[in-house]
Image (tube, grey):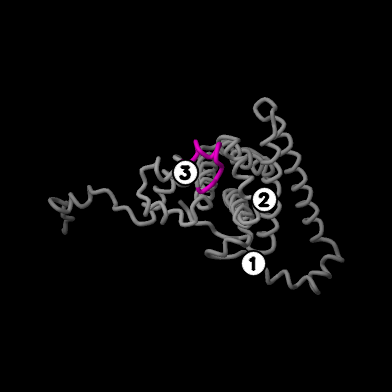
Amino acid sequence: MSTIAEPKGKELEERAKPPQKTEFDHLSEARQRLVAAALPHVVFDGWSEATFAVALADSGVDPALGHLACPRGALDLALANHRQGDRAMLRRIDSGGLAGLRYSKKVAALVRFRLEVAGDREVVRRGVTYFAMPAHAAEGTAAIWQTADEIWKALGDTSDDLNWYSKRAILSAVYTSTLLFWLGDQSENHQQTWEFLDRRIANVMQFEKFKSGLKGNALFKGFMKGPGRIFDKVHAPTGVGRPDLPGYVAPKD
């Protein structure tokens, strides 16, 4: 009977070594350090090139590596901060708390999670102002779209047709309006924000119910067999798209 040789010597040493970091790992870590160093300054200077310069100095990140990690300076820094919020939301999901909730309540819970991990409201307000600028509006829209996409994927959405776009467009609008309400909410524990969010989600569910009802409508069936057939050609994007268009898949840090 053959036996499996036990690893020893150099083989054991190789197995004990931690996996080597890739270029992606180094860039990701640099962005995280830059964001952490930038946040105290964003409140005063916004997401600006001045903030980026101070973050480079305070973080200890090599300037060459910092510019590789954020080639567009403050813009990439702000986007990295937003993606960190998305990942924090997903970790919150992984910790539980959604079991037993109705689907609409799960959607509302995820939007709430995202706002609760957003951090300092003044930093978020500065981000809203920054992405409202015409030069950065497309990137801001893509970032919100990506957040909506993360939420739907976390809920198990598998749509790959026109519904893929409509779900993300609607949830992007819900998230944006709730975010703006949250920024001005002075109620205890942001209770008014969560009530506002529940109303917006209820509106979305009514729309989904309306769409479901259309499927049994004779006129709608006739439309889908005629001019509406063009929608059969609409599919969710795959791979990395253009950052100025909905459906862009942002790089992960």
Residue at image mark 2: 172
Horizontally, residue 231 falls left or right of residue 93, namely right
Residue at image mark 3: 35
Q: Position of residue 121 (x, y in %)?
A: 60, 35
Find out whether the residues at labels 1 and 2 contact each other: C-beta distance under 8 Å.
Answer: no
Residue type highlighted by circle 3: Val
Say which label, 2 or 3, has the lower sequence index: 3
Q: Is residue 238 magenta?
A: no
Q: Nearer the viewer, residue 208 or 23?
A: 23
What mark, if any, has residue 154 been given in the picture?
Answer: none
- Depth check, mark 2 against mark 3: the one in front is 3
Q: Is residue 246 above or below residue 7?
A: below
Helix, strand or loop under label 3: helix
Q: Position of residue 235 (x, y in %)?
A: 64, 67
Q: Looking at this view, name the residue that lies furthest to the front.
A: 50
For the N terminus, give its image quadrant: bottom left
Residue range of the region highlighted in magenta in the rendering: 38-49
Q: Is residue 42 magenta?
A: yes
- Depth check, mark 1 against mark 3: the one in front is 3
Q: CA distance from mark 1 to mark 2?
A: 19 Å
Residue type highlighted by circle 1: His
Q: Position of residue 185 (x, y in %)?
A: 69, 32
Residue at image mark 1: 235
